[in-house]
Amino acid sequence: MPSITSITLEDPARAESVRACLLELGLIEGFRGDAFGALLEQFGSLDRIAATPRRRLADALPPALAERVRQGASRDAQAAAAAWEILPGRVRLTPADADYPVSLGALPQPPPVLWVMGLPHLLAHPALAVVGSRRATPQGLNDARAFSRHLAQAGLTIVSGLAEGIDGAAHEGALDTLGSTVAVLAHGLDRIFPPMHRELAHRIAGQGALVSEYPLGTPALRHHFPERNRLISGLSLGVLVVEATLGSGSLITARSAMEQGREVMALPASIHAALGKGCNQLIREGACLVESAEHVWSQLAAGLAAFKVHRPSPQAAVEVFDSSDPVLSMLQSAPADVDQIASAIGLTAAQVSSILGREELKQRVARLPDGRYQRVASTPE
């Protein structure tokens, strides 16, 4: 299948015609990357798609979508899109636009239109995707923030999906250092999901970018999330999975990255941790085991060669978790409850509770929803 990056407009003067064609097609329900890819396969170039009547374009598409293409986008949808785009910091990008990411144009199912709120030039920056579980552990959230903070400060754009858990922590870590971050959404940019991240989305739009291939009014449907994951990996030099179960959507992003030739990395986890089984599986399948930000830089070295990003000086991995304390040592490999710890080290439950309470205030341990405690070690850089 031809890619956008391998196709040049036969007549540069027709760039605006191509843009207008794709902007209208992108407003039609169901016209996304797979449909656009089918037209590229059938017609071979962007300008030929733009020059072909809609009824002929429709012949290359599934029946239901074909009928919608023949009818064209509604006037209401076109008017709403035009009104949305008038406001500052909002733009729709097509392959006819200079800011359309080359990396996405190389995908077999490139988005015909990208809706962007924020800073569109960031889509061309060297980036790392940081993804993981929505039901992350305190340690996972800490790791996502720390890795993202360090790498964003050094010049990488952090890409994620704005979901609860690891995604949100990754965005927050990048924003903490005034670094840049991109959130790829699975719905129209006139809504935010989950609602709890409305303020976070506002911060990202001011310091980074919100991106979607879905037109205004599109809800966050279940099947949109795996669809958008190819864009998260496609915008990035590599993907770092922090925590993931075996059925996690993060594994879809990781496998999309593998198919796209991106680097795939994962943080290792205890064999007793359900949220680590997906990461450990990825490592068995060939993903790079990552324990520090320096490991990430090493994996991305080839891709970063094309960008002027200064690699930070290697630092020794430092573990600040006090392993000399028997209570804390019990949490070294897996979470445990008060009674388990007390029984193992010969203290009373009251004594253990007191120690854990003190360490929780220091943010060196965290209490899980099931009542067990988990270590929260600093993330080595």
Image: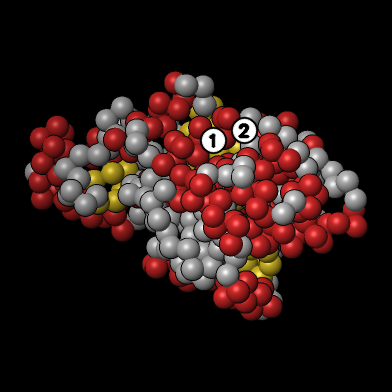
Foreground: 290 or 248? 248
Q: Which residue lies at the image location 75% right of the left edge and 59% below the top edge? A: 19
Q: Which residue lies at the image location 29% right of the left edge and 35% below the top edge? A: 274
**Residue 192 as seen in the image, left or right of residue 38:** left
Q: Which residue lies at the image location 44% right of the left edge and 41% below the top edge? A: 250
Coloring scheme used: secondary structure
Q: Secondary structure at mark 2?
A: loop
Task: Please provide percent x and percent y for residue 248.
Answer: 37, 39
**Residue 163 as seen in the image, left or right of residue 160:** left
Q: Residue 38, located in which quarter of the rendered image?
A: top right
Residue 250 to residue 215: above or below: above
Task: Please provide percent x and percent y for residue 365.
Answer: 31, 48
Q: Are marks 2 and 1 in contact (CB under 8 Å)?
A: yes
Residue type at mark 1 is Ser
Q: Residues within 10 Å of mark 1 (few under 14, many from 20)?
A: many
Task: Please provide percent x and percent y for residue 127.
Answer: 65, 46
Q: Which residue lies at the image location 66% right of the left edge and 48% below the top edge? A: 57
Residue type at mark 2 is Gln
Task: Please provide percent x and percent y for residue 230.
Answer: 55, 42
* Residue 353 at least partly seen: yes
Instruction: Give the spatial CA distance, label 2 vs label 1.
Output: 6 Å
Q: Quadrant of the N terminus?
A: top right
Q: What residue sits right under mark 2 in the picture?
A: 260
Q: What residue sits right under mark 1 in the picture?
A: 256
